[in-house]
């Protein structure tokens, strides 16, 4: 039985979802709010969490943060409306496995759950990339990107891969490894966004039995596991300051010291990191060590957003259709002109990950050979066709624009900390949440 926790305040939908999953060998517990969910998580172990983004006492992101802080390793799938896609993308950065868009399609849900559980069972994936699953693109920015990859891959230089969520940072990291002299050695990927301070130190450097509560056995760190190969640290900006100190020492001295041990272990690894944050800005805020940044940043690769890749979008659409056809046993051969226009005009805030999800959903809902606009989310149609607003001398509308911009600026300065943002704007949290809802700010 797959032990599953559903956190959803729509009782009817929660009951439908529970009944559906029970038929597929899930043992389901459900609740409607964050606080009782956290209590349940403290008392029981689960294999999977399905959490709605908008909840009566907060957002699903709070569940993600709490799970990370408690060092619980469990796949989490965010359920969200289309309007919350940008926030759902942020949830990936906090350690969510994936997100699905409401109304939830049963087949899509089962596919996502299957992938989440299979990834959890095999956390260290194989080194090799199935080249048939990827396409490089022909745009100028794509050619420049792969030229840089070819140049730096054979070296032992530390690389920072920077780009928006969903742009393919792990794929680039694996490519760098596979084209290097270390390709026959391990490639170890760690999602720093999903690790608490204590778990991060243990995961990276290992620990000895009894070194802290819960350390029931000796544990080999991933630095040691990756010896001779490549260690990929995704969302490296999320590492705590204390772990950054230990990481810098490991890189400088090429040794690691497990927690609770006096023994030092020599390691030879190449470090590749990824982030969608501006690490230089984080350094200015005192949250990331400048000396560590320079140690990691021997070469930087900037991944372009999908909206900046021109005609590559057409290639990616065709590519993802072919992949979805194979996976879902469909035979979609073309997209009608209305659906294609919509796909090409949408801004894709979730980049390649979002495109892949939308195409897979479109193929799943298409029984024939031609996909049409009915297979795309209705909210996506509205987002593309929403007319530009010209408020002219409308004082109220312009004041609202200024207020929205002030809120966005404050959120950026506080790294989306709602309490600090409310304090900066001299309003309470309830008022802030109301304004976020009003202006559609995620």
Image (tube, rainbow, N blue to C red):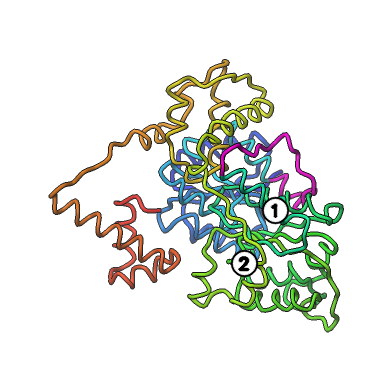
Residue 47 appears in the figure? no
> Where's residue 341, x and y in %?
43, 27
- In this rendered view, identify the residue nearer to me: 361 or 163: 163
Left or right of residue 199, residue 312 in this image: left
Residue picked out by circle 2: 70
Q: Which numbered circle lies on residue 289?
A: none
Quarter occupied by residue 19: top right
Left or right of residue 396, residue 47 in this image: right
Q: Which range of residues does the magenta coloring cover?
A: 117-140
- In this rendered view, identify the residue nearer to me: 280 or 142: 142
Specify the principal SS of the magenta part.
loop
Seen at 73% across and 53% down, the residue is: 176
How far apart marks 1 and 2 lie (CA) works out to 28 Å
Nearest to the eye among marks 1 and 2: give it: 1
Q: Which numbered circle lies on residue 173?
A: 1
> Where's residue 440, x and y in %?
34, 50
Seen at 86% across and 74% down, the residue is: 266
Seen at 68% across and 69% down, the residue is: 200
């Amino acid at each position: 039985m797959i032990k599953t926790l559903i956190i959803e305040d729509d009782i009817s939908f929660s009951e439908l979802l529970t009944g559906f999953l029970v038929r597929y060998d899930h043992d389901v517990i459900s609740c409607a709010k964050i606080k009782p969910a956290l209590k349940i998580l403290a008392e029981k172990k689960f294999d999977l969490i399905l959490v709605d983004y908008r909840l009566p006492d907060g957002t699903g992101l709070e569940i993600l943060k709490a799970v990370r802080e408690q060092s619980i390793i469990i796949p989490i799938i965010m359920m969200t409306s289309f309007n919350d896609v940008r926030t759902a993308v942020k949830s990936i950065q906090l350690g969510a496995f994936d997100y699905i868009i409401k109304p939830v399609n049963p087949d899509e849900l089962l596919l996502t759950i299957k992938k989440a559980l299979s990834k959890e069972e095999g956390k260290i994936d194989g080194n090799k990339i199935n080249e048939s699953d990827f396409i490089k693109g022909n745009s100028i920015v794509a050619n420049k990107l792969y030229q840089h990859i070819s140049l730096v891959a054979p070296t032992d230089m530390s690389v920072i891969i920077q780009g928006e969520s969903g742009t393919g940072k792990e794929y680039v990291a694996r490519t760098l490894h596979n084209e290097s002299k270390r390709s026959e050695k391990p490639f170890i990927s760690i999602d720093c966004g999903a690790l608490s301070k204590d778990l991060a130190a243990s995961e990276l450097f290992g620990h000895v039995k009894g070194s802290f509560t819960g350390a029931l056995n000796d544990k080999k760190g991933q630095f040691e596991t990756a010896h001779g190969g490549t260690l990929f640290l995704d969302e490296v900006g999320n590492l705590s300051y204390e772990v950054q100190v230990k990481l810098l020492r490991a890189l400088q001295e090429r040794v690691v010291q497990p927690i609770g041990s006096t023994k030092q272990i020599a390691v030879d690894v190449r470090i590749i990191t990824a982030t969608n944050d501006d690490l230089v800005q984080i350094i200015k805020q005192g949250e990331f060590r400048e000396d560590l940044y320079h140690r990691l940043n021997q070469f930087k690769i900037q991944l372009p957003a999908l909206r900046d890749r021109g005609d590559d979008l057409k290639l990616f659409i065709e590519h993802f259709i072919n992949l979805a056809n194979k996976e879902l046993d469909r035979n979609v051969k073309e997209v009608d002109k209305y659906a294609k226009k919509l796909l090409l005009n949408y801004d894709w805030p979730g980049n390649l990950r979002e495109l892949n999800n939308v195409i897979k959903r479109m193929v799943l809902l298409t029984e024939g050979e031609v996909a049409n606009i009915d297979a795309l989310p209705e909210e996506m149609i509205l987002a593309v066709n929403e007319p530009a607003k010209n408020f002219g001398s409308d004082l109220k509308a312009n004041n609202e624009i200024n207020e929205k911009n002030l809120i966005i600026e404050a959120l950026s300065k506080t790294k989306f900390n709602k309490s600090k943002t409310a304090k900066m704007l001299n309003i309470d949290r309830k008022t802030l949440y109301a304004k976020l809802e009003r202006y559609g700010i995620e």
